[in-house]
Amino acid sequence: MSQAPQEREHSASSGRLGYGGVFLLLALVTALEVWLGSVGVLRSVRTAFFLVLSLFKAGMVAAYYMHLRTDSRLYAYILVAPAILLFVFSIIAAVP
Amino acid sequence: MTTHSVEHSDEFRAGRELGLNHVKLGMWLFLASEVMFFGGLISSFLHYKLNNPSLESGLLDVLLVGGNTFVLLTSSYTVVMALAAARTGNTAGLVRNLLLTAVLGAAFLAGQGYEFASLIREGMTPTSSVFGSSFFTLTGFHGLHVLVGLLWALRNLAKALRGGFGEGRALGVEIFGLYWHFVDIVWIVLFTVIYLI
Amino acid sequence: MTSSQTPASSTFQTLRRYISWNTDHKVIGIQYLVTTFTFFLIGGALAMVMRTELSQPGVDLLNGAEYNRFMTNHGSVMLFLWIIPVFSGFANFMLPIMIGAKDMAFPRLNAASFWLIPPAGVIMLTSFFVGAADAGWTAYVPLSIQSADGQSLWAVSVILLGTSSIMGAINFVTTTVTMRAPGITIWRLPLFVWAMMATALLVIMATPVLTAGLVLVALDRLAGTLFFSVEAGGNPILWQNIFWFYSHPAVYIMVLPGMGIVSEIFPVFSRKPIFGYKMIALSSMAISVLGLTVWAHHMFTSGLDPRLRVPYMITSMVIAVPTGVKIFSWLATIWDGKIRLQTPMLFALGFISMFLIGGITGIFLASIPIDIHVHDTYFVVAHLHFVLFGGAVSAVYAGLYYWFPKITGRMYDENLGKLHFLMNFLGTNLSYLPMFLAGLLGMPRRVADYAPEFQPLNLLATMGAALLASSTLPFLYNAIVSWAKGPRASANPWQGLTLEWSVSSPPPPHNFEHTPAVEYGPYDYGQPRQLEQPASAAAD
C-alpha cells in the first residue's frame, strides 16, 4: 500500500539521476570530504565547505532515497522543521 | 451535527486524499523526534568541541571512518534497491539487497568497534575527558540505532523469504527504509561534525 | 456491553478490563485518567507534608534534606505523572470520536504509551527507599550528579514518561490528519483537537532534547562520563539550556489542552457559537511555536551573557498576545449568552480568572529587572501554582465533569460538584495569593525553614492547602458513587454539537455504527437547519 505511483517503480527513481546515480554522487562527495579533511586548507573555509557538502549529501538521501521529492510535502516539513530548530538550538547552546 | 452517514468505509480515507499513508506519517513524526534527540547530543558535543578543545581529537582517524561512511552510504543504496525490488514483486532482488544491507550494516558496526578499541588503547575513553564522553556517547547512540536497524533488516529478510512482501505489499520495506536512511543522514551529520570540522 | 451493566460478576469483568492490556482508545483513556489522578493525589499528599512543615518556621517534621526529597518528588510527580499525561487521557477518549473515527491510528502503540506510566511512577516513588531524588524537578547539575541513587531512578522514570508522551503525540497527530470523517475539514475541527495538535507539536520537538540531557546525566552518574563534571570542564549552563529547552514548552504542553477543554465548554454552556474560532485555533499554534523560543527566561540569573537575555524577555512577553486573544475570545463567547452555571462551566470560569492571575504575573517575571529580584522566591511558586493548579487543574476538573456522563454513562451529583468547586476555588486563592507577597518580601523557595516574619503568610497558605486537600473528598465521593450508581445519562445532556454527543453514553465499541458525514461546524448554535436525531440518543 505504498504511495508512489506505479510508473516510477520501473526506472530506478524519478528524475535524470537513478538511485545508482545518486549513490555515485554521494560516494564522490564523501571522497572529496575525506580529501579536504586531510589537506591543510584554512579552517574556516574548510568548515563552510563541509557544512555545505554534508547538507547536500543529506538532502540527496532525503530527496531521492526517502522519496521526499515525490511524496507529500508534509513529510518534508516534518523533517526540516526540527532540523532548523536543532540548528538554532546548537548555536545558542554552544555559547560558553 | 451529522446529516447522513456514509457506508462503513476505509478509516484512513482523509489521509489518502491528502496523499498520506498513516504508517509513513507516523514514521516521519518519529524521525522528527529522533532529529531532536540526536540534536540534544550533537549540541552537547558541539558545545564542548568549541569551548573545551581537546588534543584527543587528533587521535581520530578520518580515513578509516571515511571508509566506514562509504559503507553506510552503500547500505542506503542497497536498501532503496530492496524497495524497488519489493515493489515489482522481485523477491530474489529483495532478499539479495536486504542481505547486503545487513552485511554492510554489520561491517559498519565492526568498523566502529575497531575504531573504539583503538581509541581506548590510546587512552581516550568515555571517562577520560569531556571530549571522550561526548564522542563515545554520540557515536555510541548512533551505533545503537544502526544495531536496531540491522535487527529490523534481518526480520524483514526473514519475512521476505517467507513471501511476506510483494507488489503492492511493500510498505514494511519502505518504512524500514525511511528509518535506515535517516540513520545514514544522522551519520552524515556526525561524520562532518566530529571528524571533519 | 457497556460499563453500566450491573450484576457483580460483570462489574468485576469490567474492572479487569481496565487493568489489562487493551487497545480500545476509550479503555486506554480511562486508564490514563484514573492512573494520573491517583498520582495527583500522591503529589498532593507530598505537598501536604511540605505545607505542614512550612506552617511554622524551624525544622519540625522534615529536615532540610528530607524536605528537598519531598519537594523534588512533589514537583516531579505532579508534572510528569499527572498534569502532562492526564490530557492524553482526555485526548485518547475524545479525539477519535470528535473526528468521527473508530479508534486511534496506532491502537497498540497507544496501549504501550499508557503502560509505560505505571512502572515509571513506581520507579520514581520507590526511589524513596534508596535515597530519593532531591535536586528539584529541575535537577540542576552538578548537584544532581552527586545526589543519592534515587536521582538515577528519577532520570530513568522521566525518560520513560517522555517516551510515552512522544508516542502519544505521534498517535494524536497521525489520527487527526489521516482519520477524519468526511466533512471534518481543518476548520471544523473542535478546538480541543486543535489544542492537542499544538501540544503534540511541542511534545515531538522538545521532549527528545530532555531525553538526551537525562541520558547525559544518567551516564555521568552511572558510567562515570564527565559531561557535567566541573573539574573536567563540564558546563552546568549546558544542562540548563537542554533542560529548559524542553521544560518551558512543557508548561504549554500542560496548559494548551486545558485551554482546548474550556474552549469546548464555553459555547455549550452559553449556548452560543464560539467567538473567534480561527483566532483561537491559530493562537494555539502560535503559542506552541513561540513557546520554543522563550526558554532562557528561566536562566536570567544563571550567569548567562547579559546580552543574550533581552531576546528572551521580548519573546516571553510576546507570547502573552495569543494567550490574550484566547481570553478575550472566551469572554466574547459567553457575553450575552444563555449561561448555565453548572459545574463544568464554573471550573471553566475559574480557569480564566486563575490563569489570568498566573499569566499576568508571568509577564512580570519575563521582565529581567523584576525577575532578578524575585527569581527563586515564593513569587515564582505562586505564579506557577496559579497557572498550573488554578489554571490547568481547573481545566482538568472542568473536563472531568463535562465528559463524566459521556465516559461513564452516568450523571454526577451537581450539588457536590458545586461544593467541590467552591472549596477548590477558595483553597486555591488562600494557598497561593499569600505566596506572591512572601516572595516579594524576600522569602526564598525550596527551603524547609524561613525567617519568622514570613510565618503568617505561610500559615494562610497551609490553611489553603488543607482546604484544597479536603476539596478532593466531595469530588472523589461524587465520582465513585455516581459512576457506580448515579442516574443514567443520555447521549447529550449538555446539548453539545461536537460528535461525541451524537453517540450513546458511554459510546458503543467502535464509536459509530457508520462513519458520520458532517456538514456543520462544531459550535454552530442558532444556525437555522434541521438536525437529525442520532438513533441512540434519548430525546433531550
Image (cartoon, coloured by chain):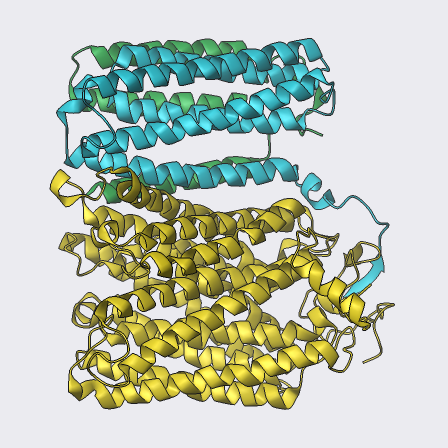
Chain colours: A green, B cyan, C yellow
Q: Quadrant of the N terminus of chain C?
A: bottom right
Residue at x-position 61% and y-position 82%: C477
Is any atom of residue C234 visible in this view? yes
In the rendered structure, the answer to whether residue C377 lies left or right of residue B38 reads left
Q: Is residue C417 above or below residue B149?
A: below
Q: Nearer the viewer, residue C21 or C408?
A: C21
Q: Is residue B129 above or below residue C228?
A: above
Percent position of residue C20, x then y: 66, 55
Percent position of residue C352, x then y: 47, 78
Q: Quadrant of the C terminus of chain C?
A: bottom right
In the rendered structure, the answer to whether residue C244 lies left or right of residue C40 reads left
Residue at x-position 77% and y-position 74%: C528
Q: Nearer the viewer, residue C436 or C310?
A: C436
Q: Residue furthest front?
A: C129
Residue at x-position 25% and y-position 76%: C378
Residue at x-position 23% and y-position 46%: C238
Percent position of residue B104, x then y: 48, 13
Q: Nearer the viewer, residue C472 or C46?
A: C46
In the rendered structure, the answer to whether residue B141 lies left or right of residue B135 reads right
